[in-house]
Every structure is written in C-alpha cells, then in structure tokens.
Image: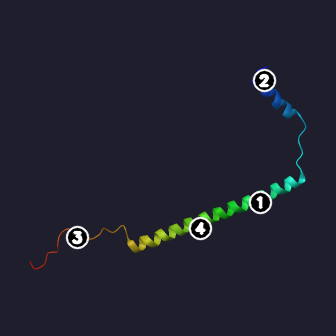
Amino acid sequence: MSRTTRREAAVRELLEGPVPGVPPELYADVVRRGNRMLRRRTTLRRLLWLLLLAAAVAFTVWASVARPWVAPPSETTPPLTGW
C-alpha cells in the first residue's frame, strides 16, 4: 500500500464514521469567545474610523491655516525702490 492510498483510506474512515458530539461546556466557551471577538472587532473598527476622521479633520485644519497651494513670495531679488 502506498502512502497516498493509506491517507485516502484514513480520510474515508474518518468521514464514514460517526459524527463526534460537541460537549456543552465547549459550546458555551466557543459562543462566549466568539462574542468577545466580535466586540473587539467592532471596537477596533470604530476606533480606526475615528482615527481616520481625526486625521481628515487635522489635515483640513492644517491646509486651511498653512495654505500650501499658495506660492511663497519670491525672495531671490531685492525689491526695487527709488527709481
């Protein structure tokens, strides 16, 4: 018997056998952990949206104060006075 044939036979044996039951205490643990994971994901998602909103507000305030789209005044030549 080759290695592949043995593996296939073992998988067929597992699939054709009885379905194992889940202990009730394990089910309660899994439900509790799943709820905790969902709460953490929801909290993390909300925090990330809040961070994104804060970054957008900070950028808007900076852009309105600094006005980076306006060209700075030229300082390469002195002003001409007294002509």
First in sequence: mark 4 or mark 3?
A: 4
Give the residue at x 68% y 60%. Answer: 41
First in sequence: mark 4 or mark 2?
A: 2
Residue type at the position of mark 3? Glu
Mark sitting on residue 50 = 4
Give the residue at x 78% y 23%. Answer: 5
SS assignment at label 2:
helix
How far apart marks 3 and 1 lie (CA) works out to 63 Å
Disc 1: CA contacts within 10 A as few (<14), some (14-19) or many (>=20): few
Give the residue at x 86% y 31%. Answer: 13
Give the residue at x 29% y 69%. Answer: 72
How far apart marks 2 and 1 lie (CA) works out to 42 Å
Relative to 31, does residue 9 appear above or below in the rendering? above
Residue type at the position of mark 1? Asn
SS assignment at label 1:
helix
SS assignment at label 3:
loop
Q: Nearer the viewer, mark 2 or mark 1?
A: 2
